[in-house]
Image (cartoon, rainbow, N blue to C red):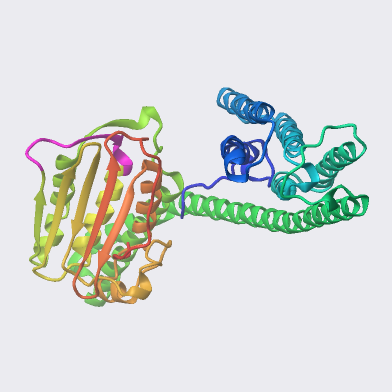
Amino acid sequence: MAADPKIAPESSHFVSAASLRVRLDWFNKLRWGAAVGVLVATLLGERLLAQSLPLRSLLMAGSVLVFMNLGYVLRNLRLPPTDIVAELRLVKLQMLGDLLVLTILLNLTGGVENPLLYIYVVHVILASLLFKGKEIYQIAWLAIGLFTAEVMGEYLGWLPHHHLLSASDLTHQLPFIVLTLASFWLVLLFCAYMGASIMKHNRAIKDELVDRQAELIAADRSKMDFFRFVTHEIKSPVNTAQSAVETALEVGGASLDEGVQDMLSRAVRRLEQATDIVKDLADLTRGGGGLKQENLSDVDLGRLAAFLLDRQKDVADRTGQNLELETPQKPVIMHTNQAMLEKILDNLVSNAVRYNREGGRVLVQVRRSSDRVCIVVGDEGIGIAPEDRERIFEEFYRSTAAQRKSTLGTGLGLAIVRRFMQELGGHLDLDSEPGRGATFTVEFPLTAGRNGAVASTGGKGHDG
């Protein structure tokens, strides 16, 4: 059972303040490239094209684009993305400014003669990524209106025209201008339609996925509540039944029939297993408090590992296993939730002993790097088949090989390990081959809460 998942409010909508800010930051990076492109093209235009251009005006337009973008970037650094209305207003203001600057640049570089007039299409595509519905068409019509006004303004003599030497006289004739504007309108409106349609479909898919994720989270919480209820309700009768059977064995003693004694002994073992399941369910549903400050303390990993190995010594001795511990000379201290860390390591060590071969070795190693600690638990036991490696962290799952090896085990041990690893920000790697044992490697930040929570379960190992 995974840690309680939540859908962040900002991710439950296709367009939200946070998602818009991410796309705005990407948009700003594109604008830096555009500004540099304008300045470079302006400086090289006269040399490469032998074209006389209004250099000062072009540099001013490029500089305006740079300062506009700088203002957007500084604003985004200072203000968190909390208001969707403000973010939408800003991105529309950005697009208006970009389209105005683009129109001025086209006017200074030939207008309808400039083949770069279709850069307007880029803004329509960007609008489809940022907006929805009529807002996309608003950007398209704004671009159409600005460029049409620029072209007709030049044709009617209201705006100065900077003729490109490579252009023919045909570009000054009304039929050519009308045909160019018509194709321009058609391309922009078609792009707006396609962008709006595709993004509408994507938004529908996103909404469906969010709804299904919410349903899965609700189902997971219901399962958690059910486990918690079962744990509470079954704990008392199981303990009572176990005490009653153990008392019957003690009081009756040798007077009981041998078959009755055997049956009662088996009942005690089964009740002990039920008690273990209740305890594991309690751990799985209650958790260990995570990284709350009041639950954190300094833990000597070497001492903890030695304690857990010593607790398994009687079981290991019955099958001739060798329990070994390797630690650095200097104590390795980790600031974390001790109860959760102890549960993780206890499950790994007990699994290693339970599924080891007779006379095999269980090796626990404690290592430290500059800011992380690593604990390795390895055995020489049954290992795990490839087809079972993805399922060993499921609740109550035990592989066929594990069931043949031992009737004990609740199938919850590694589910608890995975959940607690996630809460403590740890990383888990497993390596195993059938018949050649398994090695579990857990890695944590020295101080709880650093480097985020990372839990990898796509490996190999035993089942709990």
* Residue at image point 90% right, 50% down: 173
The region drawn magenta spans 328-340
Q: Is residue 330 magenta?
A: yes
Using the image, determine if residue 61 lies above or below residue 309: above
Residue 103, picture quadrant: top right
* Residue at image point 57% right, 35% down: 43
Q: Position of residue 444 (x, y in %)?
A: 29, 43
Q: Position of residue 409 (x, y in %)?
A: 31, 63
Residue 447, picture quadrant: top left
> Which of 464 and 128 lies nearest the eye of the viewer?
128
> In the rendered image, is residue 425 in sight?
yes
Q: Where is residue 18 in the image (x, y as percent from the top left)?
A: 62, 37
* Residue at image point 28% right, 61% down: 430
Q: Position of residue 150 (x, y in %)?
A: 84, 38
> In the rendered image, is residue 240 in sight?
no
Image check: 273 left or right of 153? left
Image check: 209 left or right of 169? left
* Residue at image point 80% right, 56% down: 187
Using the image, determine if residue 301 lies above or below residue 313: above
> Which of 329 and 25 lies nearest the eye of the viewer?
25
In which quadrant of the rendered image does the C terminus lie? bottom left
Using the image, determine if residue 181 lies above or below residue 149: below
Q: Is residue 316 magenta?
A: no
> Which of 5 and 86 lies nearest the eye of the viewer?
86
